[in-house]
Structures are given as C-alpha cells and as structure tokens.
C-alpha cells in the first residue's frame, strides 16, 4: 500500500523540489499540493493524507496554525519544512515526525521520509523514542553554517552561495547582502532583490 503524500509550501520551487525528490518512490503517491494554510486544511480534510510535508512560514496561516485548526479523526504524519531551526523544538509539541531545514539534500530528505514510513508501520499508541533522541542530538550539535541564501525575485528564487557574498550590512530590520555588482535586501522570510 502506498503512503498518500500532500505537499504544502507557498513557494513553487520548494514544492517542485519535494515533488522531484519523491519521484520514483514506489511506496508513496502524491495526492495533492497546497500553496497556503487554508488550502492545506481543505486538502487534509478532503484527501486524508498519510504524510504531509508542511512549510512552517506561510503568509496567511503558518504550519503550526494549520495543525491547531485541523479537525480530523486521524492526524497525518507531519514533516515540517522550514528555513528556521528555532521551530524544531516547537515541532515536538505538535508531534511532528521530523523537520527538514531548507536547503536540504537528498540524503536528509530520504531520512525524514523513511522515518515517516517506519512510523506508519507502528501501532498508533507506540511512541517513537528513537526519533525524539535523534532530533535532540541534532539540536544539541548546534547550528550549522549557512551554505547559501535564497533570494526571492518575483516568482523565482535565486540561490547565492555564502562564499560569493562580499559583505553583509545591517540596515534597520533588514540585512543587505553585497555580491559582486549587485546587492540583495533580506528581511526574515521576506526577501527582495535590490539592483546595485
């Protein structure tokens, strides 16, 4: 039996990446995609997915709000997808099976998906203590260095490798990345490209 998967992310490229990583996995079937929290609620209620890849930061309703609002008989397994590691601890509170830090690689994605598949085989009342220990070890290992920045430009996302950045300047509530002949202004999850 295939696991029914729902992909929820407001970024088209992020949805494309997850879809591409699931491609060829015979144990999963993508049953839909959602661009925001409201669409996620409708899709989860209508299609009863087994696994949901759920973005934390979305404009109308974040991933945690989706789960707090959701009223279904059987909760799907949640794999949070986020660019912010401070959400990892809160993921325990809502019983997420795992979380993926953007940008993630195929190996890390496969590990999260395997955790979800393994959990589907367990009796519903059996706790997955191994998963909790693994996630705590990841958090204890500390923050990893950022390898690249994702810059949103309209409907596209530009990736800039950290070593290409010449300098970073604080500008009020923003951070300006200076790269060769251009600069990019970033604020939290809102990102805007500023021509140099």
Image: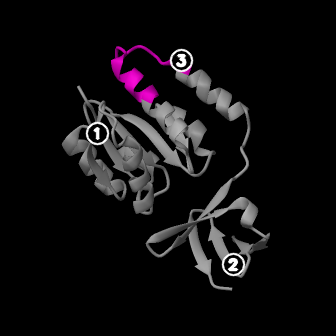
Label 2: few (<14), some (14–19) or many (≥20) C-alpha neighbours in 10 Å: some
Give the secondary structure at mark 1.
loop
**Residue at (40%, 22%) from the top-left corner?**
119
The image shows residue 151 at horizontal and vertical percentages of 58, 68
- Which label belongs to residue 183? 2
Residue 25 in view in this figure: yes
Residue of label 3: 129
Q: Is residue 177 magenta?
A: no
Name the quadrant of the C terminus. Answer: bottom right
Label 1: few (<14), some (14–19) or many (≥20) C-alpha neighbours in 10 Å: few
Residue of label 1: 71
The image shows residue 79 at horizontal and vertical percentages of 45, 38
Mark 1 and mark 2: span between their CA atoms? 45 Å
Q: Is residue 29 left or right of residue 9?
A: left
Q: Earlier in the sequence, mark 2 or mark 3?
A: 3
Mark 2 and mark 3: span between their CA atoms? 45 Å
Q: Earlier in the sequence, mark 1 or mark 2?
A: 1
Give the secondary structure at mark 2.
strand
Mark 2 vs mark 3: in front: 2
Quadrant in the rendering for residue 89:
top right
Q: Is residue 82 left or right of residue 12?
A: right
In this orientation, which residue lies closer to the viewer: 151 or 136?
A: 151
Q: Is residue 166 left or right of residue 14?
A: right
Mark 2 near mark 3, Cβ–Cβ under 8 Å?
Answer: no
Mark 1 vs mark 2: in front: 2
Q: Is residue 92 left or right of residue 63?
A: right
Quadrant in the rendering for residue 136:
top right
**Residue at (29%, 55%) from the top-left corner?**
39
Mark 1 near mark 3, Cβ–Cβ under 8 Å?
Answer: no
């Amino acid at each position: 039996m295939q696991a029914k998967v729902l992909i929820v992310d407001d970024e088209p490229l992020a949805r494309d990446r997850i879809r591409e990583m699931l491609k060829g996995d015979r144990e999963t079937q993508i049953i839909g995609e959602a661009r925001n929290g409201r669409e996620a609620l409708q899709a989860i209620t209508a299609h009863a997915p087994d696994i949901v890849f759920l973005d934390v930061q979305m404009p109308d309703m974040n991933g945690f709000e989706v789960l707090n609002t959701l009223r279904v008989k059987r909760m799907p397994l949640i794999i949070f997808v986020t660019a912010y590691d401070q959400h990892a601890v809160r993921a325990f509170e809502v019983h997420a099976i795992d979380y993926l830090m953007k940008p993630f690689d195929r190996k890390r994605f496969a590990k999260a998906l395997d955790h979800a598949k393994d959990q589907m085989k367990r009796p519903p009342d059996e706790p997955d203590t191994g998963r909790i220990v693994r996630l705590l070890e990841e958090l204890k290992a500390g923050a990893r260095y950022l390898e690249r920045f994702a810059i949103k430009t309209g409907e596209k996302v530009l990736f800039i490798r950290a070593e290409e950045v010449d300098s970073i300047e604080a500008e009020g509530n923003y951070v300006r990345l200076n790269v060769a002949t251009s600069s990019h202004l970033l604020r939290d999850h809102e990102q805007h490209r500023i021509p140099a």
